[in-house]
Amino acid sequence: MKRNLFIAQPVLGEEEWEALKEPLYSGWVTQGPKVSEFEKLFAERHQVKQALACTSATTALHLALVALDIGQGDEVLVPSFTWIATANVVLYCGAKPVLVDIDLSTFNIDADDIARKLTDNTKAIIAVHLFGLCADMDAIKAVAPDVPIIEDAACAAGAGYKGSPAGALGDLGCFSFHPRKSITTGEGGMVTTNNEALSEKVNMLRNHGASISEEQRHHGPKPFILPDFNILGFNYRMTDLQGAVGVVQMGKLDKLIDERHEAAVAYNEALSEIDWIQTPELNDDYRHGWQSYVLLIDEAKAPMGRNEMMEKLQEQGVSTRPGTHAVHMLGLYAGKYGYKPDDLPNSKTANNCTMAIPLHNNMSKEDYEYVVDMIKSL
């Protein structure tokens, strides 16, 4: 029987609905006590001193770069195979994103290519934990020991590397709560850090540069006195409505990842016998966050091209997507910096030959079996 399986679907229900009532009835709906509670839970789970909520992973990355004083004339190393926001935030700061190739076995940034791209102007590296698999942080630190590292952990809430959680592996971590992630607040983001000075700066930057937050001011002895503004900031605050949902979602995080891991293992077992498919690596040093389950198609062996494959699966009710895109092949970056597709060959291959298949917590065992059957039928 034909099914209709989404590529992703959030797990939201009665608990989240009930949680929304508290900020709605209290009248405190902008950043406030529920955001603070969400931040505390997130920091504890990811073993960091500070977690600061904001509007998206994109704004989290922007805050992290500004907190590191990235600006005109600076270079920031970014993997080319990532969502465009990872590179765009560097442009927001007036700096130059230098695109780095990836390792096709993990889809994460290649430390050897980092070593080739380092210059005296390199002021930061954005290490993307793509699809929920942490980048090889030891290898990155070995080739660039003195360069600040920002973790783009948009896909990696709850993920880990050699016993340490994502978000605690670099100088700053940046997370997403978009509905395609394992937990969601609709839109939303988080910055994590163990550096007190960076934390204080991010806290001010997300709230117009104010010296104290709205919650601190309103609960203080003189709520009628406006704060001082000594730095240029932004309005990147999360609402307490989102914070209330986030608190509930945090209680589900590890269970959701465990369920996804079980499904990914079953996918690997069922699909590894197909000689034109590379399944995701499983490694005991990593706790994969499984935001997505992404295959690499060997088009030389496959019965058809990746795009035709996605079209045929869609006809059978199986939603697919490219893993993501190669930034150096997008018009903005090819036009601005003169990149050619073959300049970053692994990113080009990943751009053309990756395919994400359905993986989420609302799927049944029969749903997963149907996806496998449809792929094998190709």
Image: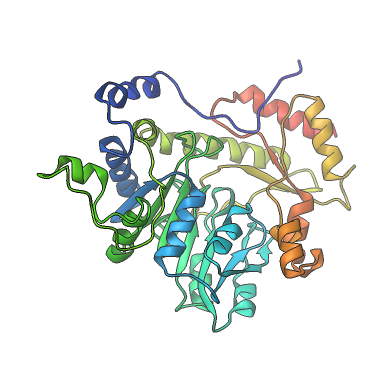
**Residue 372: x and y, percent?**
73, 32
Looking at the rendered structure, the number of numbered marks drawn on it comes to 0
Residue occupying the point 46% across, 36% down: 183
Q: Residue 99 is drawn in which quadrant? A: bottom right
Which residue of the protein is positioned furthest toward the top in this rendering? 1
Which residue of the protein is positioned furthest toward the left in this rendering? 221
Q: Nearer the viewer, residue 53 or 41?
A: 53
Residue 285 visible in the current orientation = no
Instruction: Give the answer, above or below, for where 172 lies relative to 37.
Output: below
Residue occupying the point 49% across, 38% down: 187
**Residue 142: x and y, percent?**
50, 76
Query: From the viewer's perspective, is 191 left or right of 316?
Result: left
Q: In which quadrant of the rendered image does the N terminus lie?
A: top right
Q: Nearer the viewer, residue 220 or 102?
A: 220
**Residue 245: x and y, percent?**
38, 30
Q: Residue 163 is drawn in which quadrant? A: bottom left
Q: In which quadrant of the rendered image does the C terminus lie?
A: top right
Instruction: Give the answer, above or below, for where 84 lies relative to 115.
Output: above
Which color scheme does this rendered protein use? rainbow
**Residue 205: x and y, percent?**
37, 56
Instruction: Give the answer, above or below, for where 234 lies relative to 271.
Output: below
Query: From the viewer's perspective, is 128 left or right of 339?
Result: left
Q: Nearer the viewer, residue 322 or 205?
A: 205
Residue 41 visible in the current orientation = yes
Residue occupying the point 43% across, 57% down: 63
Query: From the viewer's perspective, is 135 left or right of 214?
Result: right
Query: From the viewer's perspective, is 8 left or right of 4?
Result: left
